[in-house]
Amino acid sequence: MKNVFLGPSNHWIAIIIVSLIIFACGLNHMHVSIFNLFISVVFISSGLLLFYILRNNKK
């Protein structure tokens, strides 16, 4: 599986966690009923994911 999932495993776990958060919001129909909160959750979680990956990236 190392050939398929390139990069550190903690980055992949963080991507899965953020994806689950956004997916759970979609299952609760937030994108229809509370659109502004849904967009805020998507942007904040994506921003935190980007910050985490850039902060923990070892060169």
Image (cartoon, rainbow, N blue to C red):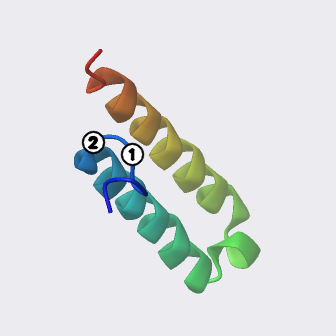
Spot occupied by residue 9 in the image (x, y as percentages of width and height): 25, 50
Spot occupied by residue 35 in the image (x, y as percentages of width and height): 71, 64
Q: Amino acid at mark 1?
A: Leu
Quarter of the picture holding the C terminus: top left
Please tell me in which quadrant of the rendered image residue 26 appears.
Answer: bottom right
Left or right relative to 9: residue 46: right
- Residue positioned 52% across, 65% down in the render: 22
Disc 1 designates what residue? 6
- Height in image: 43 above or below 41? above
- Residue positioned 45% across, 34% down in the render: 50
Spot occupied by residue 40 in the image (x, y as percentages of width and height): 59, 49
Disc 2 designates what residue? 8
Q: Amino acid at mark 2?
A: Pro
Quarter of the picture holding the N terminus: bottom left
Q: Secondary structure at mark 2?
A: loop
Left or right relative to 27: residue 3: left
Are dots 2 and 1 in contact, CB under 8 Å? no
- Height in image: 35 above or below 55? below
